[in-house]
Image (cartoon, grey):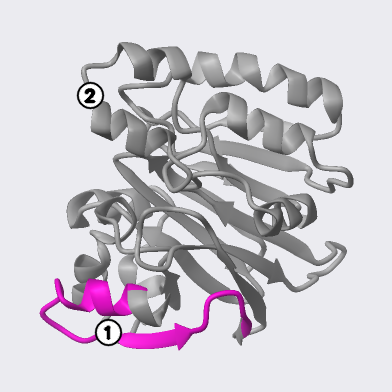
Amino acid sequence: MAFAFHILGTSSSGNCSILEAGGTRIMLDAGFQGPRLEASLAKLGLACAALDAVLITHEHSDHCIGLAALLRQNPALKVFANRETARRIQGALKVKPDWQLFETGTTFEFRGLQITSIPIPHDAADPVGYAIDCPAEDARPTKRVTWLTDLGHATDVVKHHCALADILVLEANYDDEMLDLSKRPLHLKQRIRGNHGHLSNHAARDLLLGLREWQTSELFLGHLSKECNRTILVDEVMNAVRQHKADVRVTVVDPLEDDPVSSW
């Protein structure tokens, strides 16, 4: 199984990706309802039964609502989460998954993949991102894929892991003006902008421009709000990143697009 990374979707409506490396196939977040999840996998020629594990970042529905459907199709699926996230999710499930529990901030191994859980500031029980080191294959060197969405602000730990990523998925959730003009209630706007909410387009840009040594070759901007953001706005803001680091390929993942976005 050659290396491949597929973003099935990433937005405020649902987040899910597939990583294939070293003979292992894992899902990062399962934020789609069952029918869409199965349809998205089918576009890659895959079924739920083809997955070895799923990594869950936190208990919000746009990251885990598809877990029940996955387990119906693949009861032996290993589900990685920290203890508090697993406890919150288990309460909504009719079956008990094969939980693989870890302590936030630790690194663990799964079938040749080295997986680091990254503490992130968000209004969930114990939210994390992931950095996954994939083994070298043939002439391809070791590659690190890092998945960081739902960030109220960029901590030093987050910045550290951004800098080390070869492939980085980072949220750019909202445009400031669109959020201001939206019909969302004030308390929700404050929550989104809070230290445990989400990164704006400009906050994501400033995070990246502030990295001193940054080895990323592929950058995906995700978790865009359908109501308070547009791909063209993110793209314009990220022109500064392209000028700062000319060798990085920048892709803004359209929240309205159903086709996977892939890296090989």
Query: Which is nearer the eye, 16 or 89?
Result: 89
Q: Residue 22: where, in percent of width, then height?
A: 66, 75
Q: Where is 160 relative to 95, above or below?
A: above
Q: Is residue 258 visible?
A: no
What residue range appears in magenta? 85-108
Q: Residue 213: where, in percent of width, then height?
A: 89, 47
Side of 137 where 127 appears, left or right: left
Label 1: few (<14), some (14–19) or many (≥20) C-alpha neighbours in 10 Å: some
Residue type marked 1: Pro
Mark 1: which secondary structure?
loop
Q: Are marks 1 and 2 in contact (CB under 8 Å)?
A: no
Label 2: few (<14), some (14–19) or many (≥20) C-alpha neighbours in 10 Å: few
How many numbered marks have been drawn onto this rendered protein structure?
2
User: Which residue does the numbered mark 2 point to in the structure image?
Assistant: 184
Q: For residue 1, which numbered disc appears in the image?
A: none
Q: Disc 1 vs disc 2: which is toward the camera?
A: 2
Residue at the image position 34 percent from the left and 38 percent from the top: 191
Residue at the image position 20 percent from the left and 53 percent from the top: 33
Check if residue 93 falls in the magenta segment: yes
Mark 2: which secondary structure?
loop
Check if residue 90 falls in the magenta segment: yes
Q: Quadrant of residue 242?
A: top right
Residue at the image position 70 percent from the left and 69 percent from the top: 134
Query: Which is nearer the eye, 35 or 113?
Result: 113
User: Which residue does the numbered mark 1 point to in the structure image?
Assistant: 97
Residue type marked 2: Arg
Q: Residue 186: where, in percent of width, then height?
A: 25, 26
Q: From mark 1 to mark 2, how far is it between C-alphas?
A: 36 Å
